[in-house]
Image (spheres, rainbow, N blue to C red):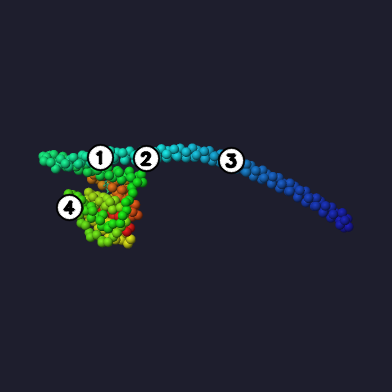
Amino acid sequence: MEFLAIVVIPMILLVLGAGFLVVSQVSSFVQSGSHNQRQHFSNIIIQQYMVQIAMAQSQMFKRGRELQVLSSRLALSNQELARLNDMRSKFLSIVVHEVRTPLASIKGFSELLLKRKVGEKEVLYLNHIVSASDQMGRLISDLTDLAMIEAGKLKMEKAVFDYADIARDILPGIVINAQKKGVELSVGEFPAGNRVNGDKFRLSQVLMNLLNNAIKFTPAGKRVELTMRREGRFIAVYVKDSGIGIHPSEIKRIFEKFYQAQYQKDEKLRKQGWGLGLSIAQEVVQAHKGEIGAISPGLGKGSTFWFKIPS
Ligand code: ADP
């Protein structure tokens, strides 16, 4: 028993201690091995990322150079476009100038001949010449306005005046147009005492365009109404017709330069214009800080054109 206590138990304890030491050594060896392996893998992944970053950087650099080349090409094309635009505006104003004078002679001499004793056929031909020169004259003046708008030179010559004058000044001519076409023209009462600071000539031109369009696009026997009224700080003008109407998809587009409604099928009516009047009217109204627009219940159901100017 004593032998057991003095020799065997310490021996067992010694063997157990040694075994424990060996196990702990081996496990720490194994652990440090797997740690190194993980470190190695992480290094490989980091290296792969670094390679990818380097590749992305070189791609970015390449794209940056390409962008530089493209933007310098774009700058050149912009310069070229500006030059061509300038040439187009100059060409337009030269043509307009060169046509205006001979046109005035053609019209003037035709009217002179009409005053002389000429035969029935001659009167008919001369009237054709006069109305064709009038039509060309309108185109020339629209093109002149367009050239001025594009050059930023359409200046408003503002003065204070009674707003109803824009209608009073043009109505005699409009009444004749309506009578010729067989369209009934109804003119509402003008509200009194509305003084406006604006370009009377240009605003009359806007109203004349709306009224002439209304008469043009309204068949004989139908009606065009002009009304003017105060709406808050604005003075508003409405031209309502019972004509061919406008498709809802084109209500905004008809104010674009050279745009003529595509849903309207009357070629004869289309040929009487160039799609410029409303775009010029819009410029004039906007230059007065006003608004312009049109509403129509649809094709064949008439339209109402309106504009408002602050006063
Ligand atoms: P245009 O000289 O061709 O009449 P506008 O700029 O004055 O040029 O008008 C543009 C287009 O708007 C016209 O061609 C027509 O299609 C449409 N339009 C203008 N006024 C009317 C109207 N009162 N009724 C129907 N359509 C209209």
Between 58 and 214, the one lying in front of the other is 214
**Viewer-nearest of labels 3 and 2?**
2
Q: Residue at x 30, y 53 (%)?
A: 199
Q: CA distance from mark 3 to mark 4?
A: 80 Å
* Badge 1 element: helix
- Horizontal and vertical percent position of residue 106: 21, 39
Mark number for residue 86?
Answer: 2
Verify CB contact (< 8 Å) between mark 2 and mark 4: no
Mark number for residue 221?
Answer: 4
The residue that disc 1 covers is 101
Mark number for residue 54?
Answer: 3
* Badge 3 element: helix
Q: CA distance from mark 1 to mark 3?
A: 71 Å
Q: Earlier in the sequence, mark 1 or mark 2?
A: 2
* Badge 4 element: loop
Q: CA distance from mark 2 to mark 4?
A: 47 Å
Q: Earlier in the sequence, mark 4 or mark 1?
A: 1
Which amino acid is tagged 2?
A: Asp
- Horizontal and vertical percent position of residue 53: 58, 42
Which amino acid is tagged 4?
A: Gly
- Horizontal and vertical percent position of residue 34: 69, 46
**Viewer-nearest of labels 1 and 3?**
1
Q: Residue at x 54, y 41 (%)?
A: 60
Mark number for residue 78?
Answer: none
Between 252 and 300, the one lying in front of the other is 252
Q: Earlier in the sequence, mark 3 or mark 2?
A: 3
Q: Earlier in the sequence, mark 2 or mark 4?
A: 2
Q: Earlier in the sequence, mark 1 or mark 3?
A: 3
Q: Residue at x 32, y 51 (%)?
A: 157
Which amino acid is tagged 3?
A: Ala
Q: As displayed, is residue 130 above or below residue 8?
A: above
